[in-house]
Amino acid sequence: MTVLTRTFGVVLVTLLCAAAPLHAAQNVPPPSQPTPTGQAPPQQSEYVPISQLPPQDQLPAARLLIAAYSFVLVVFFLYVVSLARRLTSVQRDVDRLGASLKQSGKP
Amino acid sequence: MMRLAWLILRKDLTVEVRSGEIAYTTLFFAVTCVLVFAFALVREGRAPEDGAAGILWIAVVFAGNLALGRAFERERQAETLRALLMAPAPRTAVYLGKLLGVIALLVGAEIVLVPLIALLFQARLLAHLWWMIAILAAGTTGFAAVGTLFAAMLVRARSRDVLLPVLLYPITVPVIIAGVRGTAALLQPELEVGVVRFWLALLITFDVVFVTLSLWTFESVMTD
Amino acid sequence: MPKWFVPAAVVCGVMFAFSPLVIASADYESTMGLVQKIFYYHMPSAWMFLLSGIVCGIASVRFLTTGDPRHDRTAWAAAEMAVIFGVVTLVTGPLWARRAWGTFWVWDARTTSSLVQWMVAWAYLILRRYGGPGSDKLAAGLALFGVANVGFIYVSVNYWRTIHPATTVVPKLPFSMGFPLWYCVAAFTLLFVILLQMRVRLEEQRATLDTLYLSLDEQR
């Protein structure tokens, strides 16, 4: 484990942490939508009730909002994963090559 | 410097007049392009409104792409570009000469294309001839300025044929937009001079900036 | 990696984790309602999109004048940032517009210029990938034109009928909407810096790898 891999671990975990509450916040079900078993997430009381909005605004807007925010998260998540993978593979090559260079340089 | 640019232009034109390779292929391609659009879009003798403006510029841009690709291919095959750059001449003169050559080719194509499109699409492209010439000249200059620079820079790159349009089109989109809008404004039944003048002014500003940037970039990129 | 990297990444992650709460606490906009909340991610990412274009252009000019490969690496990284933040901007924007304007896409000056800038960023990356040797200078030239372009289309904004909200919206925001916005701007800026640093680091390691290969060849 290099310092590098650990840093990416940190970035990934933090991004994942970011994903969890965001989803919780997005999935506040509009009252017009029948909730499956009736229980609401506990955070819900903190939000402005959605019934303040004009009724025709609720469903499509919520769907678009969820789509937008989850898209942003997915893009950043995938990009960080791809960057981390590219970086670790290059780092591995650098380490390997440096080691073999030292070996062949000594005798 | 202008004399050197003129010499390079004359050299290119002489080669072109003798062989006609680029001129004929470019022109043929542009005309084919227009014909395809005519088959596709003209129904019962009626063409879509404003379609002519877009098609004119698409044909010019496609033809320009072809001409630009070929213009430096000849220099590359004969290994003469290096000689040109090593000659005791300012690089900007080389660029200007090449640019004028490309513009000359495109103007030749446009002389054929404009009446052809006017005929096939029943568009009044020739109604305001001087405005049309001004817009075409400004648009062609802007497109060719960037195109010549990129074609020159790509001469030694791998897969240059594919890369030229990939690089050229996004950069020249504003020129094409301004050209199409300006031409479309000319096609209106009542000419709004203010609109045409705005797009023309935008095109000329583009030309100035693109040519200046190209001269600077050509100087610093074509170093080896 | 520099020392600030890990703390910055942690702060950035925490900021993003709390951003939904901050955004949820913002007031609704009177005419657009719920969907206007896309704004808090859309505009910061659009700013970062613009910023990455500017960074790429400046780094390219410095590379062309000095020939220092560090600037080239920054330019390359910034171009990739432009693609990433660009796709975020260009997807969240239409989702918002679908509700606010009734259509996904309008060919107005700002959307067009964003799309063109995004395409230039793609062209840059394609060039770096397939251009072969010498593509670094070529790409720098491309970036230069890309930046010139962006300034230009903004001129035509005044002449082009547009329904995109004007930039004057931002300074006029009340605190309840302004705070979430600036919070998200800070989070996105931090994210931009972190991702840019990671991307530059990748390029640096690749350069190290090349020199290592070269010295290995010399030894043999």
Image (tube, rainbow, N blue to C red):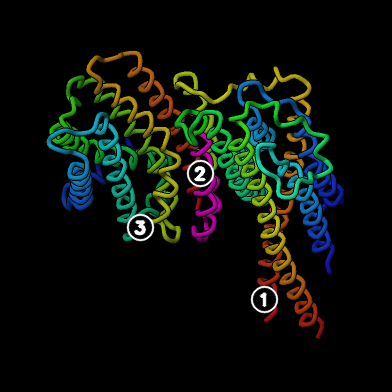
Q: Nearer the viewer, mark 1 or mark 2?
A: 2
Q: CA distance from mark 3 to mark 1?
A: 33 Å
B115 and B94: which is toward the camera: B115
Residue C50's label in the rendered image is none
User: Is residue B111 visible from the viewing direction of this image?
Assistant: no
Quadrant assignment for the C terminus of chain A:
bottom right
Circles 2 and 3 in contact, beta carbons < 8 Å: no
> Residue A104's spot in the image, x, y percent?
76, 82
> Residue A50's spot in the image, x, y percent?
71, 31
Could you say whether the residue bearing mark 2 is in a helix, strand or loop? helix
Residue corresponding to mark 2: C120
Specify start and end residues of the magenta stretch as a single range: C112-141
Could you say whether the residue bearing mark 3 is in a helix, strand or loop? helix
A51 and B57: which is toward the camera: A51
Chain label for disc 3 = B
Are tags 1 and 2 found on a single chain?
yes
Residue B76's label in the rendered image is 3
Q: Residues within 10 Å of mark 2 (few under 14, many from 20)?
A: many
C181 and C141: which is toward the camera: C181
Residue C218's label in the rendered image is 1
Could you say whether the residue bearing mark 1 is in a helix, strand or loop? helix
